[in-house]
Image: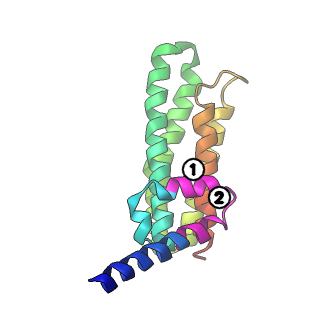
Amino acid sequence: MVKMMMMAMMVGVAMGNIVDKTCKQTPDYTLCLSLLRSDPRSSSADTVGLALILVDKIKALGAETLGQINEAYKTKPMLKKPLDECSLRYKTIVDVDVHTAIIAVKGNPKFAEGAVVDAGVEASICDGGFTKGQSPLTSLTQRMEKICDVTRAIIRMLL
């Protein structure tokens, strides 16, 4: 019984080391650790699994941003045109880029990398469509760009 508990603890430590080691190879170690450690799947994931967890984080942030866009339509009707553009871009992130990345990370990671890069670009273009200082989405966009950068770095480890 004691041996089994020690082995389970060693496996947990080894898996934690995979997260730490992987995150050290990304552009934002602290963000990477925060994102992965907040998901219980990371404790038993390999690099593909870690990449998929981060793709899920992109999807969740995309959905959150779409919710914020819908709220902004009510509170900032004068921003309808750039909000329409952002809505299309974030729907592309959630429906196309995430779907592509999930499939490709298991098969051809190069396509997953492209999808994640596109998600970051879509978010950036969305924010750039507002007159300077008027975007209600800047903080979400910056977070999306950072998560995409970390995700891309992990996907590149699969190439």
In the rendered structure, which disc, 1 or 2, sits on the residue that comes first in sequence?
Answer: 2
Q: Is residue 12 above or below residue 75?
A: below
Comparing 119 with 144, the one in front is: 144
What's the residue at 59%, 26% (across, down)? Answer: 82
Residue stretch rendered in magenta on the structure: 18-35
Comparing 71 with 22, the one in front is: 22
Please state, as top left, top right, bottom left or bottom right, where the C terminus lies in the image: bottom right
Circle 1 residue: 119
Q: Is residue 8 left or right of residue 106?
A: left
Q: Position of residue 122 (x, y in %)?
A: 60, 44
What's the residue at 39%, 63% (across, down)? Answer: 41
Q: Is residue 10 left or right of residue 86?
A: left
Circle 2 residue: 29
What's the residue at 67%, 55% (across, down)? Answer: 28
Q: Based on the displayed image, in which of its 4 quarters is residue 111 positioned?
A: bottom right
Q: Is residue 149 visible?
A: no
Comparing 76 with 84, the one in front is: 76
Q: Position of residue 53 (x, y in %)?
A: 45, 60
Q: Based on the displayed image, in which of its 4 quarters is residue 56 positioned?
A: bottom left
Kind of residue indicated by mark 2: Tyr
Q: Based on the displayed image, in which of its 4 quarters is residue 137 positioned?
A: top right
Q: Secondary structure at mark 1?
A: helix
